[in-house]
Image (tube, grey):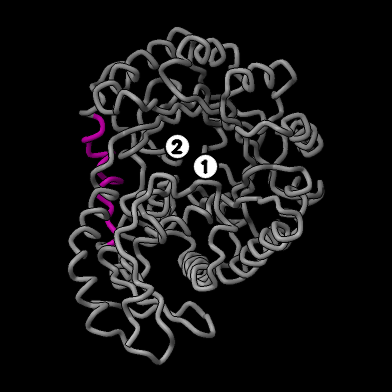
Amino acid sequence: MFSTFDIKHPDYVALIEPDNAFWALVEKNSAINDKFVNAYKNKAEKFSDEMQKLRFGLALNAVYINPTSRCNLNCVYCYIPQEMRKHGDDMSRDALFEALEKLSGYFKQVMPENRLPQIIFHGAEPLLVKEVIFPAIEKFQDRFRFGVQTNGVLLDDEAIEFLTVNGVGIGLSLDAPIKQIADKTRKTWGGDSVFENTIKTIHKLKGYDGYNVITTVTKENMHCLCDMIDFFHELEIPAVMLNMVRCTLPGAREVKPDDYEVAQHFIKALDRTHELYKKTGRKIVVANFANILVSIMAPMARRLMCDISPCGGGRVFFALAPDGGMFPCSEFIGLPDFKGGNLFRDDINTVLQSESFKKVTDRKIEDIKPCDKCAIRHFCGAPCPAEAYEMNGGMNKIGAFCEFYEEQVRYAFRLIADNIVEDYLWSEWDKDTVTLFEASALNRL
């Protein structure tokens, strides 16, 4: 029933039921008693039902709209092919309005009235067509929650005022605290730096709660992740993401860090967030790690859907290309075989059930070796299906960072054992959660 998972803690090991992600921390060299086992059995069906709902029962609630496939940068690890970023298409204003009207009608059928679906303008670089997306935000702001993921080059004062006044989420990208390292992976087509421009933009956004910064972690910048945390904390950035580079295209694989080595740098950076919090009283939340921590503590409260199988692609969100092409996720936009249909011509539900989408939504951890025997398979999910398909040769293959995920989950369990979880999570993360099982008193003989 239970698998033992070594969390590298001096006092505890984790017992995990891999099928439903139930877990308990037990003292080393101790045995669980019948009271604990019987209590678990009484709730096991509820745990399984919750995991089933998380994996297969959630409704679509977000769309990543790529209003252009062009970009003003030539980042070495981009998942969108270079030719597409150089000479791609733009979505017209009329087309975007038509798309949002159709999506609004669809979401009214599948989402509760008190919840707004989310639209994230993604890319490539969406601010290349801000004359298209800004009017759309104004017109549809009562029907959607909007976000923009941008490299920040075109985020001038006027754009910042518009986005902040309208409460639009803003995601910026910055890969290092110093120019020399940041420029190794993020630069213009002419090879120019955008580092100083990004820093100026971050300063302008100080005090705005609705923004975060994403760092794509590669072998070029993994050594400075602790410095990155210091840098972000000093700038008072409320939340950051230290995302492992997605290895979907060959350029990204050239800067892929070693799993174990990057895990050590990542964990030191997490330690640094805690040191800074204790010193200053101000948190800096690493959102992608916080999501792993929450996936252990309260699976249904997780905010990101990459670390579960099937992932969220084609299931709780999909990506829309400038021509209306529908893909399970933006990672697939450069892979024509994963185009499931066209929003302007096809029924949304039909596309969601298309063969192209089902390649992703039918990808289950139980069909992937050695993941099918792994104790932490529901805290990881063998991401990402796009990189598994392109890098490792199929949907039934592992992703790019198996060992990294193991170390990340071990670290999360150590925080739980040391009772310092709250120091790493956003405020009120458990506001709508319900405790199904409390094991603290059940294994005492």
Identify residue for label 1: 79
Q: Position of residue 321 (x, y in %)?
A: 43, 26
User: In percent of the image, x 35 and y 29: which residue is there?
Assistant: 326
Image point 27% across, 77% down: which residue?
Answer: 36
Q: Tell me if 177 is positioned left or right of 365 in this view.
A: right
From the top left corner, tell me how far across and down residue 333 is, in percent. Answer: 43, 35
**170 sits to left or right of 397:** right
The three-letter amino acid code for the residue at tag 2 is Ser
Where the C terminus falls, by quadrant?
bottom left
Magenta-span inclusion, residue 442 = no
Q: Which amino acid does the dot numbered 1 rest on?
A: Tyr
User: At 31% from the left edge and 66% from the top edge, which residue is drawn?
Assistant: 22
Asked if residue 337 can be seen in this view, the reply is no
The foreground one among 15 and 399 is 15
Q: Mark 1 Cα within 10 Å, few/some/many (few <14, many 20+)?
A: many
In the rendered image, residue 215, in percent from the top left (x then y), is placed at 64, 48
Disc 2 versus disc 1: nearer the observer: 2
The residues colored magenta run: 351-365
When asked about the image quadrant of residue 254, the answer is bottom right
Q: Residue at x 81, y 46 (%)?
A: 179
Name the side, left or right, on which 316 lies relative to 161.
left
Tag of residue 330:
2
| Extreme residue in the top direction | 94
Sequence-wise, the earlier of marks 2 and 1 is 1
x and y percentages locating residue 74 in the rendered image: 65, 37
User: Pointers 2 and 1 in contact (CB under 8 A)?
Assistant: yes
* CA separation in Å, label 2 and label 1: 8 Å
> Label 1's element?
loop
* 432 and 60: which is toward the camera: 432
The N terminus lies in which quarter of the figure?
bottom left
